[in-house]
Image: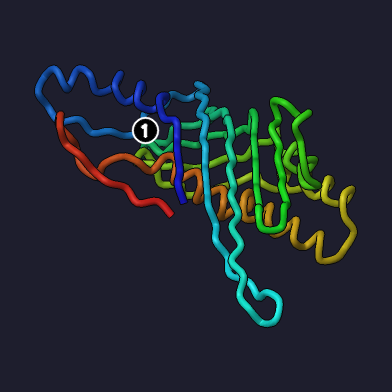
Amino acid sequence: MKVKRILAMFIVMAFSVAVSFVYADEKVDLKLRLEKGQSYKMRTLNEMKIKQTIPGQQGQQQTMTIIEKSGAKNIYTVEDVQADSTLVIKVTYDAISFKQENPTVGWNVEYDSTDTSTAVGPMTPVLGAIVGQSFTITITPDGHVKEVQGIDALWRRMEEKIDELSEEGPERVAMETQMKMQYGEEALKTNTENSFNMYPDNPIDIGDTWQRKTE
């Protein structure tokens, strides 16, 4: 999976905190240092290429390739900064986009909340229901997400749209499964941590490098 993230917001914040130390020839301890009551915006872009092998005609295996691109513009509002610097942040979906192509079967889904005239596929009303919804994360200064709360309202909105689109049956199950893969509690926790968990374990100096593995 290839993941592209636009992190200018955090780079600017880290620089503003660290600049005085750099000029003093001291190492910098990069961490999330956000202020209570402030709101920050971040845009994320994810691109995946999935290859699946499925049974074909006459017992032969068939390879199916799915190309998936998703994006979100979120507003992060700091609701509390605890004594140990752990942050409680409200995350609101300001805009989302989703595109899935399956060239093997000619099946496409496309949605962009900023231009709904381009919507293609049965799931687009469900995706549209997410815009404006919020959940809350508790996150440490080094980017580890300890807890995700408040996704019940988000899921109620999606389930209302699923109820309108599909009755009980395989199609509904498939729709719910796919949405949980994207917006379930574990998915939100993992995706949020992948966006924030980028800081080094130790203070760094000019020219230092570090690596972070995301899943």
Task: Residue at 52% x, 25% y: name it.
Answer: 41
104 vs 119, left or right, is left
- Secondary structure of residue under mark 1: loop
- Number of numbered markers: 1
x%, y% of residue 6? 44, 30
Residue 11: which quarter of the image?
Answer: top left
Q: Is residue 124 above or below residue 167?
A: above
Q: Residues within 10 Å of mark 1 (few under 14, many from 20)?
A: many
Q: Is residue 123 above or below residue 131?
A: below
Q: Which residue is under mark 1?
A: 32
Q: Is residue 71 above or below residue 109?
A: above
Q: In the depicted view, which residue is nearer to us: 173 or 185?
A: 173
**Quarter of the figure that contains the C terminus:** bottom left
Q: Is residue 208 above or below residue 13?
A: below
Task: Residue at 37% x, 33% y: name it.
Answer: 32
Task: Residue at 62% x, 70% y: name it.
Answer: 62
Task: Residue at 29% x, 22% y: name it.
Answer: 15
Residue 172: which quarter of the image?
Answer: bottom right
Residue type beneath disc 1? Leu
152 vs 209, left or right, is right
